[in-house]
Image (cartoon, rainbow, N blue to C red):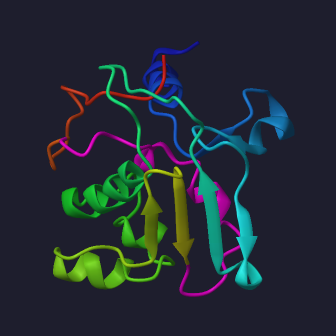
Amino acid sequence: MAWSNYGLNVVYDTYIPLLTYRHASGRAGSQDIPGVARSLPRITDHGGMYTLYLRRGLRYSDGEAVKASDFKFAVERLFRIGSSGGFSGPEDVYDDIVGATRFEGAGCGDVSGITTDDRAGRMVIRLVRPARSFSGKLAMTWVAPVPPGTPVRNQTFDPPPATGP
Protein backbone atom coordinates (compact mmCIF):
# COMPACT_ATOMS: atom_id res chain seq x y z
CA MET A 1 0.00 0.00 0.00
CA ALA A 2 1.33 3.41 -0.91
CA TRP A 3 2.11 5.78 1.96
CA SER A 4 -0.42 8.32 0.60
CA ASN A 5 -3.19 5.73 1.01
CA TYR A 6 -2.00 4.59 4.43
CA GLY A 7 -3.57 7.49 6.34
CA LEU A 8 -6.89 7.10 4.52
CA ASN A 9 -7.04 3.40 5.34
CA VAL A 10 -6.27 4.02 9.01
CA VAL A 11 -9.15 6.53 9.21
CA TYR A 12 -11.42 4.20 7.23
CA ASP A 13 -10.71 1.32 9.62
CA THR A 14 -10.74 3.37 12.82
CA TYR A 15 -13.58 5.89 12.53
CA ILE A 16 -16.45 3.68 11.48
CA PRO A 17 -19.59 5.58 10.45
CA LEU A 18 -23.19 4.34 10.52
CA LEU A 19 -22.69 2.78 7.10
CA THR A 20 -19.45 1.91 5.40
CA TYR A 21 -18.30 0.29 2.19
CA ARG A 22 -17.62 -3.37 1.57
CA HIS A 23 -13.88 -4.03 1.89
CA ALA A 24 -13.50 -5.32 -1.65
CA SER A 25 -11.97 -4.30 -4.95
CA GLY A 26 -13.84 -2.92 -7.92
CA ARG A 27 -17.59 -2.50 -8.06
CA ALA A 28 -18.12 -4.60 -4.91
CA GLY A 29 -16.13 -2.02 -2.91
CA SER A 30 -18.72 0.68 -3.66
CA GLN A 31 -21.57 -1.22 -1.99
CA ASP A 32 -22.97 0.33 1.22
CA ILE A 33 -22.99 -2.05 4.17
CA PRO A 34 -23.75 -1.49 7.88
CA GLY A 35 -20.89 0.06 9.84
CA VAL A 36 -21.89 0.80 13.43
CA ALA A 37 -25.54 0.56 12.37
CA ARG A 38 -27.29 -2.81 12.81
CA SER A 39 -28.51 -2.79 9.21
CA LEU A 40 -28.97 -0.55 6.23
CA PRO A 41 -31.40 2.33 6.88
CA ARG A 42 -35.14 1.98 6.65
CA ILE A 43 -36.01 4.65 4.10
CA THR A 44 -39.55 6.05 4.26
CA ASP A 45 -41.48 9.19 3.33
CA HIS A 46 -40.61 8.70 -0.36
CA GLY A 47 -36.89 8.85 0.44
CA GLY A 48 -37.14 11.79 2.84
CA MET A 49 -36.59 9.94 6.13
CA TYR A 50 -33.86 7.49 7.14
CA THR A 51 -34.11 5.40 10.31
CA LEU A 52 -31.11 3.50 11.65
CA TYR A 53 -30.25 1.64 14.84
CA LEU A 54 -26.83 1.22 16.44
CA ARG A 55 -25.44 -2.25 16.95
CA ARG A 56 -25.71 -3.23 20.59
CA GLY A 57 -22.72 -3.17 22.92
CA LEU A 58 -20.57 -0.74 20.93
CA ARG A 59 -17.76 0.97 22.80
CA TYR A 60 -15.18 3.55 21.87
CA SER A 61 -11.49 2.75 22.14
CA ASP A 62 -11.48 4.37 25.61
CA GLY A 63 -14.28 2.03 26.83
CA GLU A 64 -17.09 4.61 26.77
CA ALA A 65 -20.41 3.33 25.37
CA VAL A 66 -21.44 4.59 21.93
CA LYS A 67 -24.86 6.30 21.93
CA ALA A 68 -27.20 7.26 19.09
CA SER A 69 -26.87 10.93 20.08
CA ASP A 70 -23.12 10.71 19.38
CA PHE A 71 -23.94 10.62 15.64
CA LYS A 72 -25.89 13.88 15.93
CA PHE A 73 -23.01 15.37 17.93
CA ALA A 74 -20.56 14.31 15.18
CA VAL A 75 -22.63 16.02 12.46
CA GLU A 76 -23.01 19.22 14.49
CA ARG A 77 -19.32 19.14 15.42
CA LEU A 78 -18.44 18.92 11.74
CA PHE A 79 -20.38 22.12 11.08
CA ARG A 80 -18.89 23.89 14.10
CA ILE A 81 -15.34 23.02 13.10
CA GLY A 82 -16.00 24.09 9.53
CA SER A 83 -14.33 20.94 8.25
CA SER A 84 -14.65 20.72 4.53
CA GLY A 85 -13.46 17.18 3.94
CA GLY A 86 -12.24 18.29 0.53
CA PHE A 87 -15.39 20.24 -0.37
CA SER A 88 -16.09 23.93 0.04
CA GLY A 89 -17.88 23.22 3.32
CA PRO A 90 -19.90 20.57 5.16
CA GLU A 91 -23.13 22.20 4.03
CA ASP A 92 -22.29 21.02 0.51
CA VAL A 93 -22.41 17.44 1.77
CA TYR A 94 -25.06 17.45 4.51
CA ASP A 95 -27.29 20.41 3.60
CA ASP A 96 -30.07 18.01 2.67
CA ILE A 97 -30.72 17.32 6.39
CA VAL A 98 -33.58 19.44 7.76
CA GLY A 99 -32.15 22.33 9.80
CA ALA A 100 -28.53 21.78 8.74
CA THR A 101 -28.23 24.93 6.64
CA ARG A 102 -29.76 27.05 9.41
CA PHE A 103 -27.50 25.45 12.02
CA GLU A 104 -24.42 26.03 9.88
CA GLY A 105 -25.35 29.68 9.40
CA ALA A 106 -26.23 30.34 13.04
CA GLY A 107 -23.59 28.13 14.66
CA CYS A 108 -25.91 27.40 17.56
CA GLY A 109 -28.99 25.39 18.40
CA ASP A 110 -29.12 21.97 16.79
CA VAL A 111 -29.68 20.19 13.50
CA SER A 112 -33.41 19.64 13.95
CA GLY A 113 -33.66 16.98 11.24
CA ILE A 114 -31.71 14.48 13.36
CA THR A 115 -33.54 12.97 16.31
CA THR A 116 -32.09 10.24 18.47
CA ASP A 117 -33.17 7.83 21.17
CA ASP A 118 -30.18 6.59 23.15
CA ARG A 119 -32.15 3.84 24.94
CA ALA A 120 -33.32 2.31 21.66
CA GLY A 121 -30.13 3.21 19.80
CA ARG A 122 -32.30 4.87 17.13
CA MET A 123 -31.41 7.74 14.81
CA VAL A 124 -34.01 9.32 12.53
CA ILE A 125 -32.76 11.67 9.84
CA ARG A 126 -35.25 13.84 7.97
CA LEU A 127 -34.20 15.33 4.67
CA VAL A 128 -35.33 18.58 3.06
CA ARG A 129 -35.96 16.57 -0.11
CA PRO A 130 -35.17 12.99 -1.07
CA ALA A 131 -31.49 12.50 -1.93
CA ARG A 132 -30.55 9.30 -3.76
CA SER A 133 -26.95 9.61 -2.58
CA PHE A 134 -27.72 10.10 1.11
CA SER A 135 -26.86 6.52 2.17
CA GLY A 136 -23.39 7.13 0.76
CA LYS A 137 -23.11 10.27 2.88
CA LEU A 138 -23.79 8.17 5.98
CA ALA A 139 -20.72 6.11 5.02
CA MET A 140 -18.34 9.08 5.18
CA THR A 141 -15.89 8.95 8.08
CA TRP A 142 -16.46 12.66 8.87
CA VAL A 143 -19.73 11.75 10.60
CA ALA A 144 -18.54 8.64 12.42
CA PRO A 145 -19.81 8.85 16.00
CA VAL A 146 -17.42 10.43 18.51
CA PRO A 147 -17.93 10.90 22.26
CA PRO A 148 -19.87 14.05 23.20
CA GLY A 149 -16.91 15.40 25.19
CA THR A 150 -14.75 15.54 22.04
CA PRO A 151 -13.38 19.07 21.63
CA VAL A 152 -14.90 21.09 18.82
CA ARG A 153 -11.67 21.66 16.93
CA ASN A 154 -9.56 19.86 14.38
CA GLN A 155 -7.92 16.92 16.15
CA THR A 156 -5.90 15.48 13.30
CA PHE A 157 -2.77 15.22 15.48
CA ASP A 158 -4.57 14.22 18.71
CA PRO A 159 -7.49 12.05 17.51
CA PRO A 160 -10.50 11.38 19.73
CA PRO A 161 -11.58 7.87 20.75
CA ALA A 162 -12.93 5.82 17.85
CA THR A 163 -15.32 2.95 17.22
CA GLY A 164 -12.88 0.83 15.22
CA PRO A 165 -10.08 -1.49 16.26
The residue depicted at 45 percent of the width and 33 percent of the height is 15
Coordinates of residue 163 in the picture (x, y in percent):
44, 29
The residue depicted at 14 percent of the width and 43 percent of the height is 151
Q: Give the extent of the magenta segment.
A: 127-149
Q: Main SS type for the magenta part?
A: loop
Please name whichever residue, 36 or 91, is drawn nearer the observer in this view of the structure. Answer: 36
- Of all residues shown, which one is farthest toward the right? 27
Please name whichever residue, 56 or 13, is drawn nearer the observer in this view of the structure. Answer: 56
Coordinates of residue 23 in the picture (x, y in percent):
72, 27
- Total labels drawn: 0
* Among the 4 quarters of the image, the one containing residue 105: bottom left
Residue 138 on the magenta segment: yes
Is 152 on the left-hand or right-hand side of 68?
left
Coordinates of residue 77 in the picture (x, y in percent):
26, 56
Q: Quadrant of the N terminus?
A: top right
The residue depicted at 38 percent of the width and 28 percent of the height is 162
